[in-house]
Image: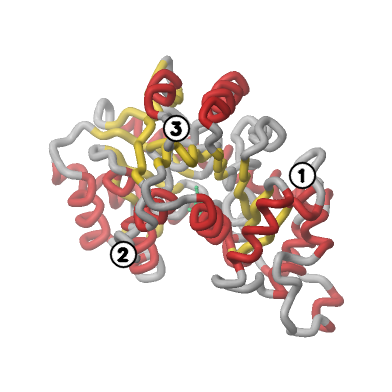
Amino acid sequence: MRIEVFELEREQSTWENLVKYNLAESGVQPMRVGDLLLDDLREERLGYPQTNGSVKLRKRISNLYPGADVDQVMVTNGTAEANYVSVWNLVEPQDEVVMMLPNYMQIWGIARSLGAEVKPWSLQQVDGRWAPDLEELEGLISDRTRLIALCNPNNPTGAVLTQDEMGAICKLAGRVGAWILSDEVYQGAELSGQTTPSFYGRYDRLLVNCGLSKAYGLPGLRIGWTVGPPEKIAQLWSYKDYTTIGPGILSDRLARAALEPTRRQKILERTREIIRSQLPIIQDWAKQHGELFSMIPPRAGAIVYLKYDLAVNSSVLCRRVRDEKSVLIVPGDHFGMDHFVRIGYGGEPDTLRKGLSLFSEVLESAT
Ligand SMILES: Cc1ncc(COP(=O)(O)O)c(C=O)c1O
């Protein structure tokens, strides 16, 4: 099996701990262990965990999806493992996968490595929002479509689908019996405070993948999950025997604490407070550049996706900013779209301000 380079992750993994100003992160400032620390954690034995996640953790997760039971949940090492195992299980060579773009390109790379044909399906800028082109989707699906992969709220645009759009997508998937994989890792990080509705419960052949890395500010726990029909979840668990076996036991315990309903609310409020107070920093900064940037403000997530009007390739621009100013931002090229940059605004405000002002210096010399 040959796998293409996952550009965004390779670049971030290589540089995020070396640069001074990391504006490539798509989550908020991570929480501290002390925010979750439990007195009895000292007594926890460092044995193997229940490999699909403890029943208590799966119960807390299943409670987030009305009608779901613990046997419909598999806990994974991050949303990344949930995505990996799901696609590995679902997709065979010669299958077609339709994937919402722009998007986090993990599913793209895995499906292609498995020999599937991956067809891009675009979000379009319509009436001040990023909207799915449903006619395009209709034209893309066929009897060979095994999977429709989408990300809602979306990385990198921060767009959120309407309930009508979600219904239409399910209907189209149902026509050809395709699975839907809905990556909902940014759910809970809405600027409006209105939780993005899940695809869960709208369609039978559905996997919802999610995790604690973004809206919860807990990426270091590496806890994610898949929710789906019990038979499919049982199958996925047997695939997971070949990947990481189970989550770390401390992560399982801390995730359980994070998802205790009152604490969960507080964590999500913290995230929303950060993104609400910091979005204006980047909006004001973009405005100072006049016509250079255009942006549809995100509905959710700690990232903005900015289109820039300069005759320079996005990877070239971001490399300059990184090498000359020690600022990491993500080029639109990593989402298959040149002349865009993705900037994370959920980190420390001072880092954000300083990183942006250094980016401005590069822009001035590039115009
Ligand atoms: C849409 C999406 N899915 C999955 C992941 C991976 O998340 P995790 O850290 O939970 O593995 C990311 C990370 O940026 C993401 O943006």
Does the image show residue 61?
A: yes
Q: Position of residue 163 (x, y in %)?
A: 62, 23
Question: What amino acid does circle 1 point to?
Answer: Leu
**Residue corresponding to mark 2:** 2
Residue 97: quarter of image:
top left
Q: Earlier in the sequence, mark 3 or mark 2?
A: 2
**Quadrant including the N terminus:** bottom left
Q: Secondary structure at mark 3?
A: loop
Q: Nearer the viewer, mark 2 or mark 1?
A: 2
Q: Nearer the viewer, mark 3 or mark 1?
A: 3
Identified at 39% across, 66% down, the residue is 13
Q: Position of residue 308 (x, y in %)?
A: 25, 34
**Residue corresponding to mark 3:** 143
Identified at 34% across, 58% down, the residue is 6
Total numbered badges shown on the rendered structure:
3
**Quadrant including the C terminus:** top left
Between the residue at mark 3 and the residue at mark 1, the CA separation in whole angstroms equals 33 Å
- 87 on left or right of 67: left
Question: What amino acid does circle 3 point to?
Answer: Asp
Q: Are marks 3 and 2 in contact (CB under 8 Å)?
A: no
Residue found at the far top of this picture: 127
Q: Is residue 174 above or below residue 357?
A: above
**Residue corresponding to mark 1:** 64
Q: Are marks 2 and 1 in contact (CB under 8 Å)?
A: no
Crowd band around label 3 with a 10 angstrom C-alpha radius: few (<14), some (14–19), many (20+): few
Between the residue at mark 3 and the residue at mark 2, the CA separation in whole angstroms equals 26 Å
Q: Earlier in the sequence, mark 2 or mark 1?
A: 2
Question: What amino acid does circle 2 point to?
Answer: Arg
Identified at 35% across, 37% down, the residue is 119
